[in-house]
Structures are given as C-alpha cells and as structure tokens.
Image (cartoon, rainbow, N blue to C red):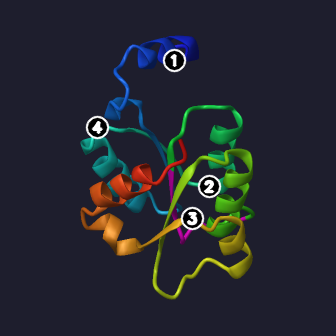
Amino acid sequence: MPPADVETASNSLPQGSCYRIQVLVVGRHKRWRDEVSAQVRMLGYQVTACDRGVDAMTVLALGLPVDVMVVDSALQGGLCCAQLAVEARALRPALRIILASDPVDAIGPEASARVPDVLLVPRDQLQNGMVATTMREALANRAA
C-alpha cells in the first residue's frame, strides 16, 4: 500500500483506536524481536522490526509513523541501545522509548540525562508476556 493510502486509511479510524499505534521493535537477536513483535501484534498494534540501530534510525528519518520504540539492550554497533535512544529522541522528541535491559545493563548517565523519560524494563519481562502492561504505561505517558 502506498504511504498516502496508509495515511488515508489510518485517518478514517476513530481517535484512540489501537490500530493507529505503531511500534518499532529493535533488537539484535531474532528470537527476541519475534517474541516481542508477536506480543505487540496480539495487542492490535502495528509492528516494524529492525535488527540494527541504523535501520531503526532510517525508519524514523524517513518519517514513517512510530509511537513507541522498544530497544533491546543487547543491540550493538555504532548505534547501540543508549545511543539509539538519544538519537531517536533528538529526531522525534515525542517518541516513547522502552529499553529492555538486564539489571547489569544500565543506561549511562549522559543518555539518562538526554532521555530522562525512557522506560527501563527487565529484558525477560518483555519475553514473559508483560508487553501489554509496558505498552500501556508508555502510551499513557506519551506527550500530547
């Protein structure tokens, strides 16, 4: 479907419909991405999944609709998890960001200062069916 058709179709949906929510799932491990994406789809949200931070930034830079970005702390490379959160927030100030991390993986102080409202959740919480609670929390706190 061309981008104009997607926009037209989504504009016909009632306000607050879950089908307007777009989630970007970014993680290095395919199994993790697939699990989280499947849970997000079961909630009725649309999902785009990427395995690299550069690909996620491309999605954001192209202007594709994204309401929530879920990033796995295991993401590596030039745009690792914390750096991706900072860059994504610079590009999209209202973007809600969920960082799935292990207890030992903390977002650094610089990134924490630049993205103070990032939701930090235990990585295994997203794998054990807690996506619905996390998504509701992220969406409830999003900027108007």
| Image position of 136 with respect to 60: above or below | below
Q: Amino acid at mark 3?
A: Asp
Q: Residue 14: percent from the left, percent from the top?
A: 34, 21
Q: Which contiguous range is marked in magenta?
A: 69-77
- Check the image and report above or below for 34 versus 74: above
Marked residue nearer the N-terminal end (4 or 2): 4
Query: Which residue is painted at 25% across and 43% down in the image?
Result: 42
Count neighbours of disc 3 (C-alpha within 10 A) and say few if under 14, some if 14 to 19, many if 20 or more. some
- The kind of residue tagged 1 is Glu
Mark 4: which amino acid? Gly
- Does the magenta segment cover residue 38? no
Local packing at callout 1 (Cα closer than 10 Å; few below 14, some 14-19, many 20+) is few
Point out which mark residue 52 bears.
2
Mark 2: secondary structure:
loop
Q: Nearer the viewer, residue 114 or 74?
A: 114
The Cα atoms of the two marked residues, 4 and 1, are separated by 17 Å
Disc 4 on helix, strand or loop?
loop
Instruction: Report which residue position mark 4 lands on.
Output: 44
- Residue 84 point in image, percent of width and height: 67, 59
Q: Earlier in the sequence, mark 3 or mark 1?
A: 1
**Outermost residue toward the bottom?**
104
Amino acid type of disc 2? Arg
Can you give x and y, in whole percent of width and height, for residue 12 in the image? 39, 13
**Label 4 packing within 10 angstroms: few (<14), some (14-19), many (20+):** some
Q: Which residue is mark 3?
A: 117
Residue pointed to by mark 1: 7
Q: Which of the two labelled residues, at mark 4 and mark 1, occupies the earlier sequence position?
A: 1
